[in-house]
Image (spheres, helix red, strand yellow):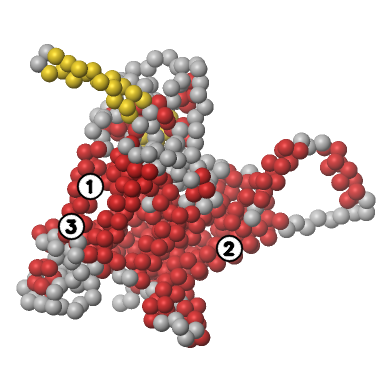
Amino acid sequence: MGKRSTPTPSTAEPAPVDAHKARPWWDPVRFARRSVFPALLQAVALGVLLFMIGAGWGLHGVEGIAVEGALMYTNIATFGFWVFWFMALVLLLPLVGRLWCTVCPVGWCNDLAARWGLARPWPRQLQNLVLMGFLLLGLTLGAEQFSLNRYPDQTALLLATVLLAAILLGLVFRGRVFCRYLCPVGGMIGLYTRVAPVEIGSANQEVCRRCESKACYFGSTKRYRLGIAGRGVEFPLRRPGCPAFIYPPEAAANAACLMCTQCFKNCPYDNLRWGARRPLAGLWLGRMRDRSEALLVVVLTGIVFYRLARFWGALRIVVEWPATFAALHLPFVGPAGFKGLKLFAGFLLWPLLFYLVLAALARLASETRLTEVAAGDQAAAVAAFDAEGIDEQRRDEARRWLLKRQTLWGYLATYGVAFLPLLAGAYAAFSLIKLNEKLGYLPLVLADPAGIRNYLAMSQIHVLTPPDSLVPLGWIRWGTLAAVAIGAACSLWSMGRVGAAVYGAGSRPATRGALVFRAGVVALAAVMLLCLRRWLFRG
């Protein structure tokens, strides 16, 4: 996911193709080839983002009222970002994947700045998802530790900082490096893209192979004529190539594709497609996936797990035990440090230990064998091995592959992505409940973006009743349990496909390793279902 792909130039040009052949009105390629798409949508989204920043800037609460998070659900900055946008995004990601990146205003600003910037390459050592994983963890910890999601001014400052960082990075580095390597939400979107049934890919890979220009990757220059009152002037217009440095025939297997549609506009043969694929297929496409995805899987597991574990008192005590132990035995751990340790244990420590234990068991199971050895057989086996004459280069390649994929982190990176359907179902269930509880505030927020009048009307003078849930909880709680159960079933089914794609069908790491991680899916799903039961069936 973090590596770039580079096409191989060819001198065999394919036969001419009508670049403007008729397509049905519903075909998304018709929109993708238009110059104004998705720029108009991105401009509207940027306007909304700037309005949210302005509505929350400098507004910490209601003057004279000392209530923590008074404007959390009434100000458009906090409500719009943390409730409406983020929860709706989590709910839709398993279905639409990277479609948000198509209209993201932050990515658009990063791209526009990169077209006029210094175009320096991003450091090779950082071409992975490690920074993205730590930024996602930092955003989650910051929102909880410092209550960023409760105060409009802090949310506005966060959004402005992200926007400014994207622009500054674009002025220095080429391509959308912020989206590829730094955007914390982009890391989560990239993982869910492997589950989503939407992809961009090549319609005919033979046409791509024989294409000489590779304009989809390198960009293209087209000439236009501006005519006014019978006179005209011609001028060239340079259209950049893929800002994520992905060759379209490899885009379907690459979770880093930003769906920016530049390849559609540059392709002279109209040889790209944007449509559906088999759900979950992205989990086992691309054998040499970036191992740094494992860090994102661990962080995302912690986010989902700890938010549900809080509703089960006994489990919460166990999860927060390391922080409690540190607070009792370390006198310098104050209340803020205690809270931070609790968050660290819930969001990172326990999920990491969980996956490492599974990886250790998978490695042990894969390397354990029981064979009967008779006298003289061992020497014969060594002689037969020496007689094979295996090429040294192939042996080195096999060793490197084993070092990468049969270590603890290798097993975690391989099988961790198969947990994504379960995580997607659990996080979607959590988001559905929150949206059902708070989406009723949306008309009030649109009528009063600052949120002060609505807060006073509801909490002080009591002339306005706080909105109720959209539907009764009993209507959706069984649906949330079903979402987790379906996600667990999909993870169990895809585990074997993932192992076979990486290690080879029938091999011990593929069979025994998948069996161990399947047991982990069952255990994690059971815990999540119990947490939801404690939360939703209390009455």
Q: Which residue is mark 3?
A: 54
| Label 2 – label 1 distance at C-alpha | 41 Å
Circle 1: residue type: Leu
Residue 384, how many percent across, how many down?
Answer: 86, 41
Q: Residue at x 43, y 22 (%)?
A: 213
Q: Residues within 10 Å of mark 3 (few under 14, many from 20)?
A: many
- Residue at the right extreme, as displayed: 376
**Closest to the observer: 186 or 461?**
186
Where disc 1 sits, the SS reads helix
The type of residue carrying mark 3 is: Gly
The residue that disc 2 covers is 356
Q: Circles 3 and 2: CB distance less than 8 Å? A: no
Would residue 460 appear left or right of 324 to someone viewing this image? left
Marks 3 and 2, the one that precedes in the sequence: 3
Q: Is residue 489 visible?
A: no
The quarter of the displayed image where residue 358 is located: bottom right
> Mark 1 against mark 3, which lies toward the viewer?
3
Q: Which mark is residue 46?
A: 1
Quadrant where the image shows the C terminus: bottom left
Q: Tag 2's secondary structure?
A: helix
Q: Where 173 sits versus 201, above or below?
A: below
Q: Nearer the viewer, mark 3 or mark 2?
A: 3
| Residue that sits furthest to the front in the current view | 118
Find numbered disc 3 in the image and state the secondary structure of the residue it sits on.
helix
Query: In this rendering, does residue 109 appear at all?
Result: yes
The image shows residue 395, relative to residue 159, as above or below, that is: above
Q: Is residue 406 above or below residue 436?
A: above
Q: Give whichever of discs 2 and 1 has the lower sequence position.
A: 1
Which residue occupies 43% across, 49% down? 181
Dot 2 alpha-carbon crowd within 10 angstroms: few under 14, some 14 to 19, many 20 or more: some
| Spot occupied by residue 17 in the image (x, y as percentages of width and height) | 37, 17
